[in-house]
Amino acid sequence: YILGSGLFDRNPGKVLTTIRSPIDMLASKKNMLLFHLYKTADPQKYVMTEEALEKELARAIFSWMVASYEYSRKKAYYPVLFEHIKGQFRRQTMERLSDHLDLTFDSCMESYSNKLSENRVSNELLYAGSSLRRLTKGKTSKTVGSGSFSLTEKERSFIHARFDQERIHSMLTSSPDSFYSDFHSFWENNFYSDLPVIKKWMDWYQKGDNSKLFEHYSSFNYGGSNAEKAF
């Protein structure tokens, strides 16, 4: 619902969205782009342009802003932190999620390393593959903290200059209880001085200007069709 929650608001239900460290989101996007271009590659040998890094950083932070905004409006819009799924708070996170969905917690939810066949569609709450696994032909398969491996020092320095990571560091490392008590007001944080385009997107989002938002937000995206322009 990052481009508008209206379709969900029309019907009763509960909506889940997974959010992740913006730095790891950039690293994952870089891995994906390199895979499009080269199939196998060493991420440390390629550097994304500053324009591509800034655009993808804005998209990553905006996903947090929208998830927080909707959660503050309506608890049915339930965010799940990827780092909680893959880390020490896995069980606590899945127990809370089960309560939210009125489900009985099952022991299969406690592990994120379930063996699921490659040809089955899998919910990422139970299974999430690593973009590094494909890029490095299985030599590396990190999902959390991949930014330290996939992003070069030059890329990380640029990101740090554009984005104060301390604003989200405590949320990434906090317990689920602390995370949910803080996340509902995250969207009120002022990232606009660092990345002013976020203010424009949030204004459009809140006003329901979905077409305008879609066109501009999508123009910031790098994918298979324009992967070479990111480097």
Image: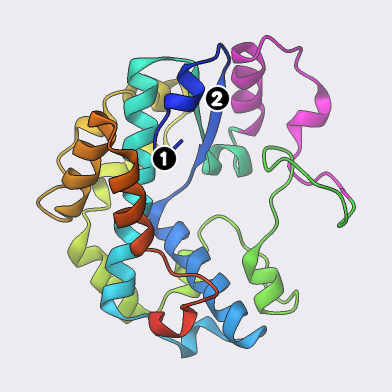
Q: Is residue 83 left or right of residue 190?
A: right
Residue 119 against residue 200 in the figure, above or below: below
Q: Mark 1 or mark 2: name the one nearer the start of the chain.
A: 1
Q: Can residue 183 be seen here?
A: no
Foreground pick, 70 / 86: 70
- Give the spatial CA distance, label 1 vs label 2: 12 Å
Which quarter of the picture shows residue 57?
Answer: bottom left
Q: Which kind of residue does numbered mark 2 sit on?
A: Val
Q: Magenta stretch: give its range.
A: 90-116
Q: Residue at x 55, y 74 (%)?
A: 224
Residue 228 against residue 11 in the figure, above or below: below
Residue 217 against residue 29 in the figure, above or below: above
Q: Which residue is mark 2?
A: 15
**SS at mark 1 in the image:** loop
Check disc 1: other Cα within 10 Å, few if <14, some if 14-19, many if 20+: some
Q: Which residue is mark 1?
A: 2
**Residue 197 position in % (x across, y down):** 19, 53
Q: Residue at x 33, y 76 (%)?
A: 155
Foreground pick, 220 / 114: 220
